[in-house]
Image (cartoon, rainbow, N blue to C red):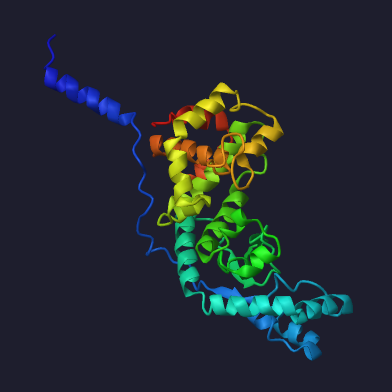
Amino acid sequence: MKFNTFYIIIILMLLNSCNSEKERKLDFDVSGIKLGDFSITRYECDLFSLQPDHIKEGLQAIQQKYWIFLAADLEDTTNLNQIEDFITDPELINAFHETEKKFPDLNSLSSELESAFKYYTHYFPGNLIPQVFTYVSGYQYEYPVQIFDSAIIIGLDVYLGKGFKTYSEIGIPQYKIERMQPDYISIDCMKELALQLLPPSQKTTTFLDEIINLGKVMYFLDATLPKKEDYLKIGYSQEQIKWCSENERNLWAFIIDNQVLFSSDGQIIRKFTNDGPFTAAFSKDAPARLGVWFGWQIVRSYMNYHPEITLAELFRNTDNKLIFSQSKYKPIQ
């Protein structure tokens, strides 16, 4: 039987296209998704407006509204004294006034989070949208965003901008200060939400497990904050993320050649995933958390090769070796 050469070429092209990587379109219209009356509630404004002489009455008046902060017994004088000390502390009063100046309103953040939650609802239609509160944390920069029960709480005083002098004065590392800006609030919120979605049984045993788990979190940011720049999502400078792309092949070769990929050595895992000014294993030009960056590229590749896999299915899949093998990840530089 003779076959027309033209048709053979067409068939081969079609077969090849079925197995090729095609980037998913994540930035789509979610305006039709309704969240109800979404808003951000500012605890710090009501808290610091209380009169210390009438602290008990004032707190009782707002206790129901701010249940996440005021679950303690307000009949207990110890609790009342702690809150009074907090709102009369000069440093914390100054922090509150600085947040008022930096964030006279939260319209921009509210719009960003509302959009992100619409994408979240698209991917996880049965999941509850958390209430969102802001507060003054006392510069708890290690915990800028936290999730408790069905609420997200945001410490606005750790997003006052990298030029805010108090940060360096109280000894916060410069690499942390670089990310203490308003652009990172929605990213940190959605990152914390993504961490909640990882199955409890998904315990890290190897370097690969850890970076795939972290890669899932980063891909969640791709899916829920599609308009955010990559360098912001991972918390690098534009120069750092460019450096990663330019050195991707050599970095990956190092990981493979030094048998890092399947290592269960906690020290090695932390070396490539912990925060810091740089990755000492390479050079001072190499940003920290390179393992996170690689996990992100692997998960992106996996999702692009498998358009039938949903975001929810990705998070439910605990077979990280399978995800890696089916990602067909290969640095191109």
Left or right relative to 51: residue 178: left
Is 238 placed left or right of 99 in the picture?
A: left
| Residue 39, position as x, y percentages in the image | 53, 73
Q: Residue at x 46, y 45 (%)?
A: 241
In this rendering, the answer to whether 314 lies above or below 150 is: above
The spot of residue 40 in percent (x, y) is 56, 73
Viewed as shown, does residue 176 lie left or right of 253? right
The residue nearer to you, when weighing 82 against 96, is: 96
Judged from this view, the residue extending furthest toward the top is 1
Q: Quadrant of the C terminus?
A: top left
**As rendered, which of 98 and 64 lies closer to the eye?**
98
User: Foreground: 19 or 182?
Assistant: 182
Name the residue rendered at 46%, 65% in the picture: 112
| Depicted 194 relative to depicted 181: above or below | above
Q: Quadrant of the N terminus?
A: top left
Residue 187 showing in the rendered view? yes
Q: What residue sits 67% from the left and 72% below the top?
A: 136
Residue 316 visible? The answer is no
Image quadrant assignment for residue 97: bottom right
Q: Quadrant of residue 228?
A: bottom left
When the figure is inspected, residue 220 is found, relative to residue 11, above or below; the finding is below
At which x and y percent is residue 152?
62, 64
Report which quarter residue 92 is drawn in. Answer: bottom right
Q: Number of callouts in the render? A: 0
Residue 177, percent across and down? 60, 59
